[in-house]
Image (spheres, rainbow, N blue to C red):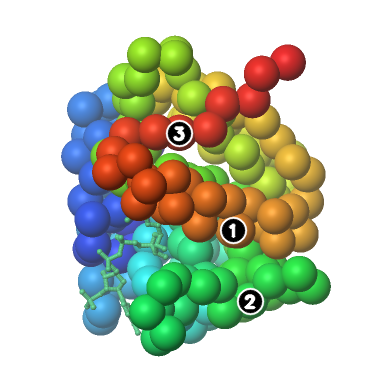
Amino acid sequence: MRIGLLGSGVVGQALSSGYQRHGHETQIAGRGSFADVAGWAELVVLAVAGSAAEAVAAEVAAATAGKVLIDATNPLDHSSGAPRLFVGFDDSLGERVQRAAPETRVVKAYNIVGNGSMVDPQLPGGPPTMLICGEDDAAKATVTGLLESTGWEVADLGGIEASRYLEPMCLAWVLYGVRTGGWDHAFKLLR
Ligand SMILES: NC(=O)c1ccc[n+]([C@@H]2O[C@H](COP(=O)([O-])OP(=O)(O)OC[C@H]3O[C@@H](n4cnc5c(N)ncnc54)[C@H](OP(=O)(O)O)[C@@H]3O)[C@@H](O)[C@H]2O)c1
């Protein structure tokens, strides 16, 4: 699959090299090339700073119409020192991204884990669970296939509104890392 990474930071780079190991073609986009790479790609991953996510989603809206866009972003606000979310409870960044690109099939994924574990997580407890959400079942099936082929179990929380509950989980993940000094943990849903 041709996968475009919108964002050249650590997440864009980790996903690009991880997907390449699995035989996918990738291109990383930075400022100035988001729309070009989104036009080339069959599937795109939004991996920019949360503060830029809506604007970049709007910028690629035409190029991603009808395509699957994985929203890996978190609405982090670092202005007060400790990270906080700049949206929550009755809205979320996932919903804002979907509204900014209404014809794009947005699936929230990857936001609850560190970049080092995004592809082929190797954890003693076995495969972790990626919690995902989005409006389009076929898009979620595509993302589930990509995740399952790269070392994940997947649990679908429903529509994109579930981003309201997924985005705070990133801070639970961060706080556990701060307390333990380790960054190779991930959530698992036991049934
Ligand atoms: N790091 C993780 O392990 C992790 C895990 C889960 C989710 N996330 C989320 O994934 C996203 C990317 O994280 P990251 O760690 O890869 O961040 P990062 O290394 O700081 O990279 C951020 C990217 O966003 C771009 N960007 C920032 N402001 C922009 C703007 N105004 N317009 C266009 N592009 C802009 C940067 O471009 P420039 O280089 O040109 O500034 C860069 O490509 C974030 O939303 C983060 O919360 C991160």
Circle 2 Cα neighbour tier, 10 Å, few/some/many (<14 / 14–19 / ≥20): some
Visible in this render: residue 36?
no
User: How far is the residue under mark 3 from the one under mark 1?
Assistant: 14 Å
Badge 1 residue CB within 8 Å of ligand 1 = no
Q: Position of residue 187 (x, y in %)?
A: 53, 33
Judged from the image, the quadrant occupied by ligand 1 is: bottom left
Q: Name the residue under label 1.
A: 167
State whether residue 21 is above or below residue 66. Answer: above
Q: What residue type is labelled 3?
A: Ala
Visible in this render: residue 152?
yes
Q: Which amino acid does label 2 sit on?
A: Val
Q: Name the residue under label 3.
A: 186
Q: Where is residue 89 in the image (x, y as percent from the top left)?
A: 76, 69
Which residue: 29% across, 39% down? 182
Snapshot quadrant of residue 129: top right
Q: Position of residue 24 (x, y in %)?
A: 29, 34
Q: What element does badge 1 sit on? A: helix
Farthest front residue in view: 179
Q: Position of residue 181 (x, y in %)?
A: 28, 43
